[in-house]
């Protein structure tokens, strides 16, 4: 597949912001993404194919908890395993930080993402009413426990 995963850097901001606009109705701004570069709790990384950013993930690790903020793969590169690679890399990074679990929210209607998360060991833990806007929709809270006592 030849996908390179690496930490997001300042040179990636414009491409990641473009991916945000392509994938989300309420995208992060370039300024917001750039601020994450100096956030010690943030772990943001890109997936590159032939030098081009085709996906990215951002997460925040605080104490022993890890929360995925966004997972995005460009439309033309979906269903090729890039989202799975991003999730697996996120789990690796969370384990390196000795996190007990990794959690995320996903639109109730995003069945393909829900299937991917479940196949990677995430479980539905609850629902957030009206979590998303444009359109308004509930979110499922999905969590994967990384320690046996989790």
Image (cartoon, rainbow, N blue to C red):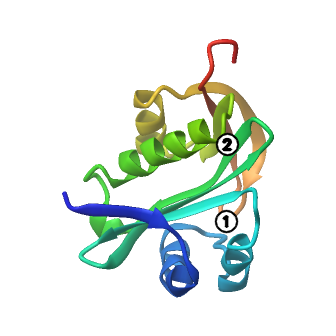
Q: Residue at x 50, y 46 (%)?
A: 110
Residue placed most toward the observer, 122 or 6: 6
Q: Position of residue 93 (x, y in %)?
A: 55, 46
Q: Residue furthest top?
A: 149
Q: Residue at x 43, y 31 (%)?
A: 120
Q: Which residue is mark 2?
A: 139
Residue 126: x %, y % from top left: 72, 28
Badge number at residue 134: 1
Residue 141 visible in the shown view? no
- Pointer 2 local density, CA inside 10 Å: few below 14, some 14–19, many at least 20: many
Relative placement, left or right, of 122 versus 54 is right
Q: Is residue 130 visible?
A: yes
Q: Is residue 135 above or below residue 52?
A: above
What's the distance in space between the residues labelled 1 and 2, CA to CA? Answer: 13 Å
Element under label 1? Answer: loop
Residue 72 vs residue 9, the one in the foreground: 9
Q: Identify the residue at image location x=34%, y=54%.
A: 82
Q: Residue 124 got which mark?
A: none
Residue farthest to the left, as pictured: 1
Vertical relation: 50 (above or below) 113: below
Tell me which corner region of the image, top left, top right, bottom left or bottom right, holds residue 66: top right
Circle nearer the N terminus (1, 2):
1
Q: Give the x, y percent position of residue 142.
A: 62, 33
């Amino acid at each position: 597949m030849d996908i390179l995963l690496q930490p997001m850097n300042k040179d990636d901001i414009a491409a990641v912001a473009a991916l945000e606009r392509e994938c989300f109705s309420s995208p992060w701004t370039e300024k917001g993404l750039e601020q994450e570069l100096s956030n010690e709790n943030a772990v943001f990384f890109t997936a590159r194919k032939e030098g081009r950013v085709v996906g990215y993930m951002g997460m925040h690790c605080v104490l022993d908890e890890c929360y995925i903020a966004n997972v995005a793969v460009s439309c033309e590169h979906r269903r090729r395993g890039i989202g799975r690679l991003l999730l697996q890399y996120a789990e690796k990074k969370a384990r390196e930080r000795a996190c007990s679990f990794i959690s995320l929210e996903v639109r109730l209607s995003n069945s393909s993402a829900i299937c991917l998360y479940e196949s990677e060991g995430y479980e539905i833990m609850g629902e957030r009413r009206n979590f998303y806007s444009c359109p308004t929709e509930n979110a499922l809270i999905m969590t994967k426990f990384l320690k046996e006592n989790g």
